[in-house]
Image (cartoon, rainbow, N blue to C red):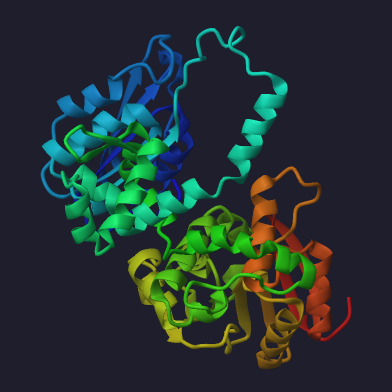
Amino acid sequence: MSHGHPEGVDWLLVIGDETALPAIARWLAEMPAGTRARVFIEVGEESHRQELPTDADAVVTWLSRDGAPAGTTDLLEQAVRSMEWLPGSVYVWAAGEAVTLKGIRRHITADRQVPRERMDFTGYWRRAEPAPGAAEDAVPEDEAAHERLHELTDLAPGFAIRTAVTLGLFELVRGGVSGPAELARRTGTDPSLLGALLTYLVAIGLLEADGEGGHRLTPVSEELVEDDHSSEEYHLGGAQAAMDLSLSGLLHALRTGEPGYRTAGGDWVATAMLSDERLAGGARAAVEEEARWVAPGVSKAYDWASVTTLTAGGHGVGTLVNALVKAHPALRVRIAALPSELRVLDERILDTDVSPSVELIPQTGPVPHGGSTVLVSRLLERLADEDAVLALTEASAALPADGTLLLVEQIRPVGGDDLDATLQNLRLACLFGSGLRSQDELAALAVRAGLRVRRCDDIGWDHRLWVLERGAGE
């Protein structure tokens, strides 16, 4: 459960199998006292029930499969269909086996008329049956290697699917618009080219021809439109697309150490973020969600009770401020960022009980100024070494003699087993000419900027909190 508590609803409906238990348990533990919630949890057997402490007015219903394999029952769907629906507006959160969730989502959408913006459905996993006769039908090793190579290097499906998502094609088909001419009119595209795209989407299994000149969704495209995260993740104007497309500049980045990717408008991503609200806001929202994992570590790694006023900037800082103000209600915070990023913080990140303690300061520069305690989160990962040193130097110069600079950054993990971190390292290099740095490399940048490392703490998830002060040297 990576989202904050939904605001402006009368009650919550929470649904999940055992893979959703960690998220549900955390959410129940953090629900404000008195929150009305109905929670349905499916487990393998009765003995798998757990204690789920909460101050909420939550009714938890456990559903046991009694030994049936996970993903083979409709226990959750039947429980939701037969439940007593509470009055007022509802927010629905559901996670678990992807196919099992489909019937629940259709019921919530069609029968209960819950709007999409008040739902969050996520398929955590999908049940698969072993292919019959797998041993007899084994593909020769050299042929399998060739097919695997083709699968790994084929760029066409990704571009075609992302283009269709950006045009809203799958949503239109789900809504009953299926003819090529009407789809072209609705999307404002060339009919001939759109026809070619539709043909390709049929060939790769994202659409099916309905035999009457139209199209219908397949299980794969149904999964795409029913997962509430896919529309943003695959939209070509979003931050995730920029991250994925950035690898087209990997060769240039490897040879020069400089960014290798520009947006469709010809701008470097760092420049485009100054004017493209979707790109900047999407990037901000993604990092804010990731910051929920390290917020507890940040709260514990410093004596925040001694801080009365905090100036904060960087990325993911809104989520950190949520956690800090809730733990220390007397804390007053100033957050400095681009106007588009502040809008995301105000509308989507900062909780309503935290906002009165936070002042949002529009600025174009990356470094927040003012106050004796400054928190900078994940700023350096988007800056090349010389720019990172300049940013830290500016932050140091703005500190009073006894001031403290707190720096939160993700480090490059030792080894190479973390594939996500490895890809993040390459993408950052292509986008910004930077990348993830080691703990020693980040400390060296601070020293070059005239800062002294007072302390460095592991706050989890390959992140560190540096406590820095003015004055070069170790």
Residue 380's place in the image compared with 119, above or below, is: below
- Image position of 431 (left or right of 121): right
Of residues 378 and 322, the one drawn nearer to the viewer in this rendering: 378
| Quadrant for the N terminus in the image | top left
- Image position of 327 (left or right of 297): left
Residue 396, percent from left and from top: 71, 87
Residue 330's place in the image compared with 202, above or below, is: below
**Numbered disc total:** 0
Q: Measuring 34% from the left and 32% from the top, which residue is drawn there? A: 219
Task: Single out the residue that lies furthest toward the front.
Answer: 192
| Quadrant for the C terminus in the image | bottom right
Of residues 443 and 152, the one drawn nearer to the viewer in this rendering: 152
Q: Measuring 68% from the left and 91% from the top, which residue is drawn there? A: 400
Residue 251, percent from left and from top: 72, 63
Q: Write down the quadrant of residue 360 in the picture.
A: bottom left
Residue 82, percent from left and from top: 16, 25
In this rendering, does residue 428 appear at all?
yes
Q: Measuring 76% from the left and 82% from the top, which residue is drawn there? A: 386
In this rendering, does residue 325 appear at all?
no
Residue 400's place in the image compared with 414, above or below, is: below
- Image position of 452 (left or right of 315): right
Residue 369, percent from left and from top: 58, 88
Residue 358's place in the image compared with 171, above or below, is: below
